Image (cartoon, grey):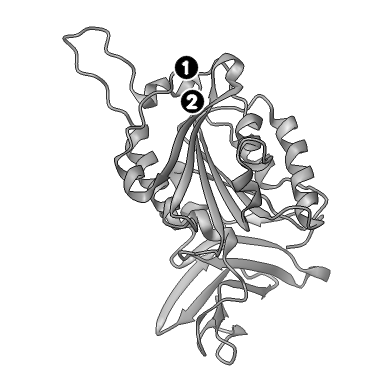
Amino acid sequence: MPRGKLLYEVPPANTVEPFGKINYWDAPNGQGLIVRATILMDVRIEGAKMGIAIDGSASMESLFGRKPMSAFLPAPPNHVKPSAQAMSAYLARKSADGKIATIYWATGPEGREIQFLGDLTDEEAEKFNFVAPKHYGTGTQLLPALKYFTDGVQRPDLKQARWGMYVFITDGQMQDLEAVKQWCTQLARDIEAGRRSDIKLFIIGLGNEVDEAQLDELDDLDTGTEIDLWDTRLASEMKDLAEIFAEVVDESMILVPNDGLIRDSRGRIIKDYRDVGLPGVLEFTLPHGERAFSLEVAGNVSKQELK
């Protein structure tokens, strides 16, 4: 995608099957819109390492289930546990060693500490008791967790991996966003220069108190490189766990040999993949005034609006 241009994204709730992330921007000279769309699919990457970090700040207490006010009252449900189990197990199955590094972040004083939960297999993750952290954080600091996965000090195995994906779950506002952006800018520069392996960072916002503007800042972070580190989502908008991998689809991967057509809303062929096969990432130009397209493949038609 171009640097320095205003990018638009179709909200995840508005994408239709089989699309994952869809971005578009103005084509040169007012010729229309350039569209880049990923095909939503499970992706396996050789040598991958996975990690998940769950917000352990005080604002998460209601989601973990507060202790009942009285022994006569039933304990409130733990809403974190089933979601954490499902997501951790899913990611463990994508890891080269079949495990996922699992932590709570934003714990302790000022939310600067992390609590290591273990390297879990998918079976262990499905049964793991994601109870409340030992010490809820009095703030929300993302950088310590980010460093845990990326700086190689505590986890040299993660830094040495051929590829890594690290998922962060939060319900609130990060208090160290500028420090995180600086760290990520250096990460991107190191990746582009070949000084370290590639990584992908994903943050999922829970509930009504999450700061969407901060998520957008990370998603659109300009590091001065071609490296796109972050993808962000609101949990309420996610339809499938496979959306986590929407940005890492190999665009050279042919999903359907000798098939695939892109048409505009008038039925005109915009892109023909029947000679080369349908790739994991589609990029094409819609004529001026067009705000919708359709994908025809294997006898199926998916109509997608840009809104």
- List x then y, in percent, for residue 63: 38, 26
The amino acid pointed to by label 1 is His
Q: Give the quadrant of the N terminus.
A: bottom right
Asked if one can make out residue 70 in the rendered structure from this viewpoint, the answer is yes
Report the residue that reaches farthest toward the top: 70
Disc 2 secondary structure class: loop
What's the residue at 36%, 46% (across, down)? Answer: 86
Q: Give the quadrant of the C terminus.
A: bottom right
The answer to whether 150 appears left or right of 178 in the picture is left
What's the residue at 69%, 55% (across, down)? Answer: 197
Tally of numbered discs: 2
Asked if one can make out residue 238 in the rendered structure from this viewpoint, the answer is no
Task: Determine whether label 2 and label 1 are within 8 Å by CB.
Answer: yes
The amino acid pointed to by label 2 is Gly
Report the residue that reaches farthest toward the left: 72
Residue situated in front as seen by the camera: 76 or 209: 76
Residue situated in front as seen by the camera: 301 or 63: 63
Mark 2 or mark 1: which comes first in sequence? 2
Residue situated in front as seen by the camera: 178 or 20: 178
- List x then y, in percent, for residue 239: 41, 53
What's the residue at 30%, 14% (across, down)? Answer: 67
Q: Mark 2 points at which residue?
A: 56
The answer to whether 26 appears left or right of 139 in the picture is right
**Mark 2 against mark 1, which lies toward the viewer?**
1
Give above or below for 275 relative to 285: below
Q: Mark 1 points at which residue?
A: 135
- List x then y, in percent, for residue 105: 54, 29
Disc 1 secondary structure class: loop
Q: Residues within 10 Å of mark 2 (few under 14, many from 20)?
A: many
The quadrant where residue 76 appears:
top left
Q: Residues within 10 Å of mark 1 (few under 14, many from 20)?
A: some
